[in-house]
Structure formats: structure tokens, C-alpha cells
Amino acid sequence: GDAAPGPLPAHGPGPGPGAMLPLLLLLLRMAPSDAHVGYMPELTQRPLAARVTTSTFVLEQPRCIFTNTSSDLMIWLVVALDEATGQFDPRTQPETPPLAFQTFPNNTAYATLGTSVANYPCPAPTSRDITVLRVGSETACRLNASRPSCNGPLPGPGPYRVKFVAWKSSQLEAETEWSEPITLLRAHMVPVTPSGRSAGMIVLTSILSILFAVLLACLVALLVTCSSVFSTKADAVSVRRYNTHHVYDQPAARL
Ligand SMILES: *[C@@H]1O[C@H](CO)[C@@H](O)[C@H](O)[C@H]1NC(C)=O
Ligand SMILES: *[C@@H]1O[C@H](CO)[C@@H](O)[C@H](O)[C@H]1NC(C)=O
Ligand SMILES: *[C@@H]1O[C@H](CO)[C@@H](O)[C@H](O)[C@H]1NC(C)=O
């Protein structure tokens, strides 16, 4: 139903706060019951590099999932600790402290990637669009308290569960099921240096550079040896030829 509690008159004649409270509670209880959409968000199956990293994961976009395509319907992604999904209250509005990224995981869940449902249309049958979402890809807003919906890097390996929630002017319209638990890579499995390159990569690069230098040195040595051999041979040949020429010249001259 549409029995949403409207804004209360702040001052003026009419029933006092004491009289309004029961009515308010009644209205809250009549708030639309959340429509569960039978969809479970899932990690993308596309052959993408880094489907799961130490601080991000890639989901399929919820295309064709929400049937109400009215453009004021906002779809948010809620990320929660696996063990705390029961504590998520879908009546909590996104972009408010209980769902802020900056206090996660202390607040057990946060809402991010809010966008109009119009951005998740049904894909055309022949479409080759990349329809995925990388969760955890924004680093600039990580500590900025005025960006509670920051899509910041996940603080640990989890596991996490996610669900898409449709809010219309901050009121719950529909929600999907929770995903399966998503566990990220552990930091010690991929040690990352401040430059963002893994230590393994750096070791590999060093070994390759050394091998390349050795190869280059061998090549130079080979070239030097070859050129000295060739120049010696060339001398020998020219000397022999000279001699040969000289030897056969004599009888020819005699004829
Ligand atoms: C779709 O949403 C709009 C506003 O968001 C609402 O007025 C309308 O009743 C909804 N339609 C359905 C079929 O739920
Ligand atoms: C979570 O709470 C603990 C203990 O209260 C605190 O030390 C920590 O800084 C908090 N973390 C965040 C991200 O708020
Ligand atoms: C924090 O976010 C707000 C709102 O997006 C922005 O105006 C402000 O510049 C940001 N502050 C920092 C330090 O990035």
C-alpha cells in the first residue's frame, strides 16, 4: 500500500506529540511489506581477470530483476558480514550512518552503488555489453565520512553476503535474496607492495632481467669471438689465395 507516514507538522495547532505517537506507530506498521525478488546476486561467471581480489569482487548486474522500472526507484547493493545478515534492517535508509561504508564492519552492513533501476534494463539478446559491478573499487572516498555510500575496498577476506535492495524515496520497495558467502583472497596469499605490484611479480621480473642480462652478455661475447674468428679466417683465405694465385700464375705465364 501507499500508507507512508508523511512529514509531521513541526509546530502549530492540532494533536500534540503524545496523540501523534500511536498513529505514527500504526503508520509504520502499515508501511509496505518488502517484496522479495527471487534472485540471488552472484559473482560473475565471465572469464574476467581478478574476479575476486583481496579487497574487491565482481558481481553480475541485477538486469531484468526488478519489474518496476519507474525511474525514481533506486537500486542499492547491501554488503554485510556473512554472520551478521540477520541484523540488516531493510527499513534503514542508505546513505545514513547505520549503513555507512566508513564504519563497516562495526555496523555489520553498508549500502553502496546506488543507481536508478533504469540503469539495469533487460539486455538486448545480442548485446555484448559488460554487465558487471566491481565491489570495492573506489579508494578515494574510503575515509571520507561525507561519502557514506563509498564503494571502498573491503576491509578483510570476509566472508560477505550481498543483496540488492530497491528503495523509492528512502522507502523499501523490494529486495533480492542474500548471495552465497563470498570469501576474498587473503593478504598473505598475494603480498602487495605499496606500489600495488605483488612481491611474486617483482621477484619474477628481477629473475627475468638477470636472465636477459646474462643472455645479452653471452650474445656480445659470441659476437666478439665470431668476429675475431672471421677476421682471422678472412686473413688466412686472402693469404692462401694470394699464394695460390701466385703459384698458378707462374705456369700460365710460361705457356
Ligand atoms: C512502481 O513504482 C512506482 C513509483 O516508484 C509506483 O507508483 C508504482 O505503483 C509501482 N508499480 C508497481 C507495479 O509496483
Ligand atoms: C570498530 O570498533 C572497535 C572497538 O570499538 C574500534 O577499535 C574500531 O576502530 C572500530 N572500527 C571502525 C571501522 O569503526
Ligand atoms: C569528501 O566528499 C565530499 C562529498 O563528495 C567532497 O565534497 C569532499 O571534497 C571530500 N573530501 C575529501 C577530503 O576528499
Image (spheres, rainbow, N blue to C red):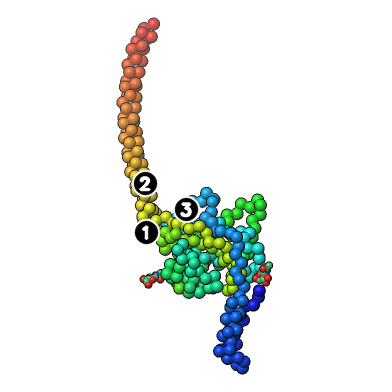
The quadrant of the picture occupied by the N terminus is bottom right
Q: Position of residue 75 (x, y in %)?
A: 58, 66
Alpha-carbon span between mark 3 and mark 1: 19 Å
- The reply to whether the C-beta atoms of the residues labelled 2 and 3 are less than 8 Å apart is no
Q: Closer to the N terminus: mark 3 or mark 1?
A: 3
What kind of residue is marked 1?
Pro
Q: Position of residue 246 (x, y in %)?
A: 34, 14
Alpha-carbon span between mark 2 and mark 3: 19 Å
What kind of residue is marked 2?
Leu
Task: Identify which residue, 46 or 10, lies in the foreground.
Answer: 10
At x 57%, y 81%, the residue is 25
Quick one: label 2, few (<14), some, or many (20+) residues within 10 Å?
few
Left or right of residue 225: residue 132: right
Query: Is ligand 2 within 8 Å of the beta carbon of the residue shown at mark 3?
Result: no
Which quarter of the picture shows residue 67? bottom right
Per the image, label 3 sits on a secondary structure element best described as loop
What kind of residue is marked 3?
Ala
Residue 204: mark in rendering: 2
- The reply to whether the C-beta atoms of the residues labelled 3 and 1 are less than 8 Å apart is no
Residue furthest out toward the top: 255
Left or right of residue 81: residue 63: right
Quick one: label 3, few (<14), some, or many (20+) residues within 10 Å?
few
Q: Quadrant of ligand 2?
A: bottom left
Residue 194: mark in rendering: 1
Q: Closer to the N terminus: mark 1 or mark 2?
A: 1
